Image (tube, rainbow, N blue to C red):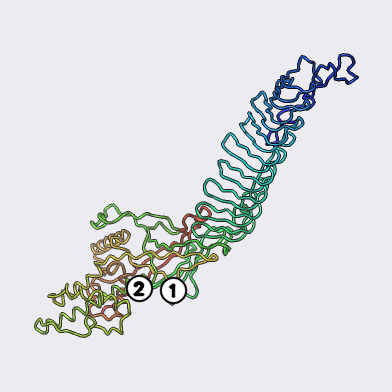
Amino acid sequence: MTVNGCDGNSTSDVSAREDLEIVQTDSKSESGSSKGAVPVTLGVTPAHRMYRGEKDANYRSGFGVYVYPNNFFRYEGEWKDGKKHGHGKLIMRDGSYYEGNFLNGEIVGRGTRFFASDGRRYTGDFSCGECHGEGQVEYSDGSTYHGQFESNKREGFGVLSCDKGTYEGQFHSNLCHGDGTYNYKNGDVFSGYWVQGKKQGHGKLQFSNGTTYEGQWRCDKYNGEGELRDSSGATYSGLWCYHVPSCNPVKLSISIPPDSSNSTLNVSTSEDGLTAISVAQGEAFSIEVVVVSSEDQVVTQVGGLQIAAKALYKHIPAPPDYKEPLLEIVQQTELPVENTPVYAAVSHPITDLLEFMKEVDRAVGSHLSQQNQNRKTTVVNATDNKTVEHNNGPNLALPRASMSESVQSCIAGMAADALLGNQGKNEDTLNQDSNRSTNRDNWTAPSAQTQLITEGTTRFPALVIPCAPLGYRPHDLEDFLDQQRRHQLHSKGGGGSTHLLGVGTGGGVATKKQVTELNYSRMTEAELRRTVSCEKSARPGEYVVKIEDVTEPPFLGRRLEPAYLLINVLAKTPTLP
């Protein structure tokens, strides 16, 4: 009889012949007569016999205890015809044991085997001393297996539970092999084919964070045709080579679409090799974005990446004699400085054309509402302070049909406040308030909407660089340095014109005289729109637009390299009626 472990390790050999006692006569042993026989154990002297128990015709039969000559094995249980037969317990000196059914001296049938060497306990079917058939193993680390065994090894269908999770499926030679599902403790689930304990063939892995991969595997790696759907929404569908996409997305590349609606757009290439464009204040521009590999091939297999546009303005270190304005001390937070291919820069607003036009319409509507209120106040003064009712209400300046819908809605919302707040003011005072209204308006443009990559490409259809908010440090420093230069020229007798770097909170270059001559109350809607567009636009100069991957969490554990675009904003002269 061979006693083996359920993992195929042989513990020791116990010969079934040691269990059989042979009867010898006192006269001649060759006669084979059993009369007056003295039982002995084959191959050993009577002094080594260690059996205590029941006998039948001098054969061990019934219950008995037998200690083997090597003192390693001890059997307690049932016997028949000199062999272990029925229920019994075979105990080893190291603490291991088998307890269960015996058949003609062999371990056959149901039983329990305990292994002192590693603490395993197997309960199930046995055949010829080996774990064979249906059974369950409990390991010392708490792991369990319940399923089929063959020749002491996990073979066939079974369920293995361990500290990593639970596997339910096919086994071969103790390893996951064939179709099976592994539910990991961290929430991941793999369902597919296994080869010698590794994922191989077709399978689907669903991560606990929502990411899924379905396709071909090899040695636990994505390998072959497959699709990865990230929890961020990003996807890659195509060939994989040991966890790496065959066409690996590495960076972003940008271009200016040839069908751009901006006819004044001037596209060139800078000395640094970057694409550069020139646009007038308030003019929109489009950007085409593609995902490329390290070989600059467009990766059409990727989609769902989130791409953002970010504007940057050149960072200007503060000179030693610069004093922070009170507004900046109270309100301003230090802008982080980041490096670009051309220079260090800080963040600047960039928005969509739709948002920019909404703000322009709002401001134009405010000025038109003020114009109507000014005219109504003039009529009241002309009739000895007697209010004159007009059917058109606040729309005296321009017919409603000549206004855009957004302007009309702004006028309707502001007319009542204007009527209540401006009674008793003369026309000059109202005009001054109107001129100052834009300067007091600290509009912060909303960020441009992120775009999603589809088949390796996307587009920002209409971007605008608007004015910076009040207290924007780079502009304040520019004004300070410009003022110092003008003082130096004046002290040397150079004279020169005096300029303001911006109209209102943002815009174009205009002299002080021109700014004071801006009279919104006398402008038409078209003139107001042109002027307000300048006010709400970025200060003329050079800007950098950064196109970056903002997918969260980063796809494949990393972000794509960003792309940069140089933009030269050209001044647009405001309307001077």
**What's the mark number on residue 141?**
none
Q: Secondary structure at mark 2?
A: helix
Q: Earlier in the sequence, mark 1 or mark 2?
A: 1
> In the rendered view of the protein, which quadrant contains the N terminus?
top right
In percent of width and height, residue 321 lies at 26, 53
Q: Name above or below for residue 259 compared with residue 208.
A: below
Callout 2 crowding tier (Cα within 10 Å): few <14, some 14–19, many ≥20: some
Front one among 475 and 172: 172
Q: Name above or below for residue 415 compared with residue 22.
A: below
Front one among 323 and 425: 425
Contact between marks 1 and 2 (CB within 8 A): the answer is no
The residue lying at 34 percent from left, 65 percent from top is 445
179 relative to 33 in the view: left or right:
left
In percent of width and height, residue 305 lies at 50, 61
219 relative to 270 in the view: left or right:
right
Residue 323 appears anywhere in the view: no
In percent of width and height, residue 212 lies at 55, 56
Front one among 280 and 448: 448
Q: Nearer the viewer, mark 1 or mark 2?
A: 2
Amino acid type assigned to the residue bearing label 2 in the image? Met
Amino acid type assigned to the residue bearing label 1 in the image? Leu
> In the rendered view of the protein, which quadrant contains the C terminus?
bottom left
Q: CA distance from mark 1 to mark 2?
A: 19 Å
Residue 220 appears anywhere in the view: yes
Residue at which label 1 appears: 265
Q: Secondary structure at mark 1?
A: loop
Residue at which label 2 appears: 357
Callout 1 crowding tier (Cα within 10 Å): few <14, some 14–19, many ≥20: some
